[in-house]
Amino acid sequence: VQLQASGGGLVQAGDSLRLSCLASGATFRDYAMGWFRQAPGKEREFVGAITWSGAGAYYADSVKGRFTLSRDNTRNTVALQMNSLKPEDTAVYYCAADVRYGSSWWGPVYDVDYWGKGTQVTVSS
């Protein structure tokens, strides 16, 4: 599975940003999709994951209520809508895919099979 993320940028605190990830090379609906992020000097952390159909999603507590995942299985895309952004959301965001949906995403041990290159999100105060 190849994953291409886009949509990062520089915004101010309180603004919104939408990340998108385009998948190719496999049957998209066979994969749960999600996002991780890594801030400078910190370990990579789970952001959210969405089920194969898009009917369910799970979020990290730090983003719950502000970030929303969606997917379009006809276009092989998954989106992360980020609202009410905070400076602590600044990080490189990585799209990911795995046939499983569960603790392989939210830990405590991340065990996701496919990763895209990251896209930088910077939130200024």
Image (cartoon, rainbow, N blue to C red):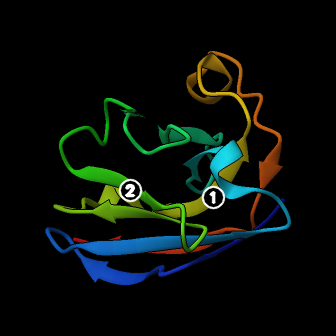
Residue 65: where, in percent of width, then height? 18, 42
Residue receiving disc 2: 70
Name the amino acid, label 1. Answer: Cys
Specify the quadrant that holds the N terminus: bottom right
Give the vertical position of 39 relative to 20 (above or below): above
| Nearer-the-camera pick, 76 or 41 | 76
> Dot 2: what SS?
strand
Name the amino acid, label 2. Answer: Ser
Does residue 76 appear to the left or right of 17 in the view shown?
Answer: right
Give the class, few, some or many, for how many residues have Cα within 10 Å of label 2's Cα (few <14, many ≥20): many
Give me the residue at 77% from left, 28% from top.
111
Give me the residue at 61% from left, 68% from top.
76
> Dot 1: what SS?
strand
Give the vertical position of 107 relative to 114 (above or below): above
Q: Tell me which numbered mark, 2 or 1, is placed earlier along the sequence.
A: 2
Residue 122: where, in percent of width, then height? 42, 73
Q: Image quadrant of residue 61?
A: top left
Give me the residue at 73% from left, 39% from top.
98
| Nearer-the-camera pick, 86 or 125 | 86
| Nearer-the-camera pick, 125 or 8 | 8
Question: Marks 2 and 1, Cα distance to the nearest angstrom?
Answer: 13 Å
Residue 95 is tagged as 1
Residue 90: where, in percent of width, then height? 43, 62
Q: Image quadrant of residue 119?
A: bottom right
